[in-house]
Image (cartoon, helix red, strand yellow):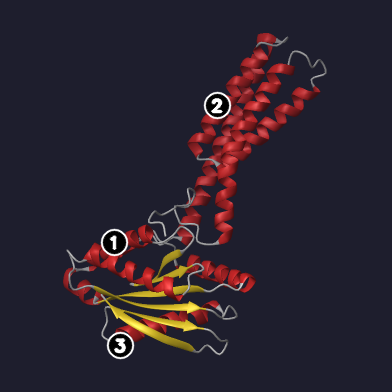
Amino acid sequence: MTSLSQLNPDTGARPCDPKSRRNHALRSLLRWSVPTAICLLLAVLACFSALDASGQLNLVVRWLLIALLAVASSICTPRFAILTTAVTLLTWSWIELQGPGGFASAPGQMVRFVVVMSTISWLAWLRAKLTAAERVARVDSLTELPNRQAIIEALKAELSRARRFDRPFSIAMLDCDGFKQINDQHGHLAGDEILRKIGVSLRQQTRPFDCAGRWGGDEFLIVLSEVDQSDAQLIAERLRATMRHHVERDFPSLTFSMGVVTIRDPELEWDACVELADQAMYASKHLGRDQTRFEVVSSTSGSARGDQSSTT
């Protein structure tokens, strides 16, 4: 298991579900292919601008260049898109100035530069606004973890994959023991700092293709992709130990209760999976807190087998 988080460069969130991971891979590919295609088209324009008397080839290349610049504004960072557009337009103008028309086409080139730069800048600004809105909709602002909606989508995707490939997975519900007392004694800012530290710990100690997010209040839900019970036990205990390490110096009384459920029945719905993890978490609290309760669900009846609980 890797200890490094992998953030989505557009939203800042981790790519929790397969669709997000596919989009991330596609955009990474396009970020390299679009500048390469622009360079190739500029080379074609330079080679044939003087030779193509009809101008038909140049017209096609010009439209392709503008289309690629528009694509760049939708997949690259705004600064990179604007810089790429400026360099492309200046190179394009230089090529045309070397052609038969010479400086006679300079006024038209200036108009083209202003119009295309304005359009691409507006597209980059619009994309930045949409990205910010998407981040607000899917990321918890305090912990910078996926929010409830993003977790539900990831859990649905994991259930769908389990149905296709008949592979188990695990989910873990985490709750902070004594969080309310710390809020009452030290104030809500102290509670916010605890939640931020938990967010850092979960980002560092979960894999890029898992989904660890804030479910609500001081509860966190972790979807462990294709993780069976034996691995889930190791992961859960390491997570709990790591979170204790992050908070024990400032809040030594804070502990964590966790319920971990391994799903071997992919016919369950996502809300039933969450309910089972929630019940396992409360069972660990009833056993004395600062524990992890492990269970396995293997039938459509929803029956679960509590295998063991452990304490740090």
Q: Position of residue 56 (x, y in %)?
A: 80, 23
Q: Dots 3 and 1: beta carbons under 8 Å?
A: no
Q: Nearer the viewer, mark 3 or mark 1?
A: 3
**Residue with the mark numbered 3:** 286
Q: Dots 2 and 3: beta carbons under 8 Å?
A: no
Q: Going 62% across and 38% down the picture, which residue do you hit?
A: 70
Q: Position of residue 19 (x, y in %)?
A: 59, 59
**Residue with the mark numbered 1:** 197
- Can residue 19 be seen by looking at this rendering? yes
Q: Going 66% across and 10% down the picture, which residue do you hit?
A: 98
**Real-space Cα distance between discs 1 and 2?**
42 Å
Q: Across the whole image, how many numbered discs are drawn on residues?
A: 3
What amino acid type is highlighted by mark number 2? Answer: Ala
**Real-space Cα distance between discs 3 and 1?**
25 Å
Camera-nearest residue between 91 and 251: 251
Mark 2 or mark 1, which is nearer the start of the sequence? 2
**Residue with the mark numbered 2:** 86
